[in-house]
Amino acid sequence: MSELILSCRHVWKLFGADPERLLAQHGGHPSSEAISASDHIAAVRDANLEVTRGEILVIMGLSGSGKSTLVRCLSRLVEPTSGEIYFQGQNLLAAKPAEMIEIRRHKMGMVFQHFALFPHRTVLQNVAFPLEVQGVERTQREMKAMEIIELVGLNGRERYYPRELSGGQQQRVGIARSLAVDPDVWFLDEPFSALDPLIRREMQNEFLRLQNMLHKTIVFITHDFDEAIRLADRIVIMYEGAIDQIGTAEELLTNPATDYVREFTKDIAREKLLTVSSIMVRGRIAEANNGLTVRHDEKLANVAGRIIRHGGQVPVTDDQGAPVGVISVDHILDALYGAEG
C-alpha cells in the first residue's frame, strides 16, 4: 500500500464577516443558499483528498473553482476556516506559525505561474536563496544550487540575470529554486500557463524527466485537461469550491460522477486516452484472428485500425502475454461514438 504523505478532511475556506459562526450554525455543512444569503463566499467546500508518496496529483477546474485556494490551504499559506490537514502524519492546523515556516522552508517546494525571481540576483543566487534562508553556508549552498541548475538544464547560465533569460529558462530557474531544499512535497500552481505552447510542451517534457529522476510527491494545478492527461497519475476536478470527482483521466472519461465532469471531458480525444483494458470484455477468450492480439494497456488510437481491418473479436493479453479478454470493432465504436448517441 502506498504511503500517505498529504491529506485533507472536510476542509472549508469561507470568506466573509464571520465564517466560523456560519459553519457552526449549519452543523459544519452550510448550503449554497445559506452561504449566499449570509454574504459569504465559499472558496473551498468540504474538500477531502489524499496524496501518496511519488504521486502526481493534478487539481483542475475553471477560474474561480477553488483549486489555488485549496492548495494554499494545504500549505497553510491560506488559513482554512475548518477541517483537518495532515502532512506526514502531522496535523498542520495544530502547528504554530514558526513551525509552519520551518516546514515550508525544509519540506515543501512551491512554483507559481509568475516566476517571482529576484531581478537583482543571478540564476545561481536565485536558486540558492532558499538555502540562504535556511542559514546554509555560502560555499555549500552554491554547490547544491549548481547541482540543481545542471539538473534542470541551465548549466552555463548560472551567472545570468533573469532579464537575460527566455520565459522557459526563467521558469526552469523557478523550478530549480523550489527543488533546492529537496522538498518532500512539491506544489506547482499553473507553472507553465504563461508560456508559449511550444515552450509549454518543452517544460512538460522537462517536468516529466525530472519526476522520473526524483520521484517527488507533487500537487500540480492546471486548467488544461491535455496537460493534466500528460502529467497526472490522478486528477481532481473542482467546481465552485467543491471536489466533483477524483480519478485517473481514463476513469473521469469513462465514468464521470457528475454532469460537470462529463461536460469538462467531452472534447477530449477519447481514442488517445482510453486503453484496451477500459473497454474490453474480460474473461472471454477468443482465437487470434490471423494471429492478431493486442495488449491490455495499449491506447485505442494505436490499435483501432488493426482491429477494424481484421474484424471479429481480437484476443487481449496481459503483460506476460496471457489472454485476459477480447475486444471487437463494436466495442471500439461504442467507446468512441456511443456516448454521443
Image (cartoon, grey):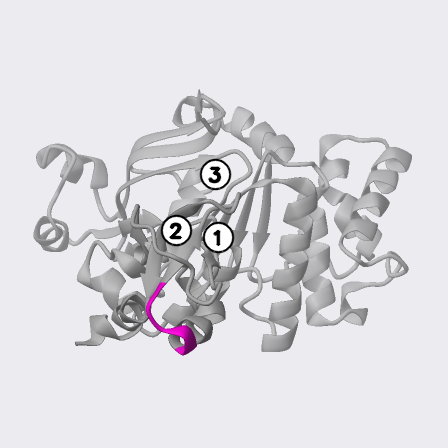
Element marked by disc 3: loop
- Between marks 3 and 2 in the image, the one whose residue lies nearer the viewer: 2
Where is mark 3, residue-wise?
75
Q: Which mark is residue 232?
A: 1
SS for dot 1: loop
Q: Is residue 196 left or right of residue 283?
A: right
Res 169 visible = yes
Quadrant containing the C terminus is bottom left
Badge 3 density bin: few <14, some 14–19, many ≥20, Cα 10 Å = many
Instruction: Answer with left or right where residue 161 lies relative to residue 326.
Output: right
Q: Secondary structure at mark 2?
A: loop
Magenta segment boundaries in residue numbering: 309-313
Give residue 248's mark.
2
Give the percent coordinates (x, y) of residue 24. Answer: 14, 32
Q: Nearer the viewer, residue 7 or 209?
A: 209
Q: Marks 1 and 2, Cα distance to the nearest angstrom?
A: 8 Å
Amino acid type at mark 3: Ser
Distance in Å between CA atoms under marks 3 and 1 = 20 Å
Residue 106 percent location from the top left of the image:
64, 31
Badge 1, how many Cα within 10 Å: few under 14, some, many 20+?
many
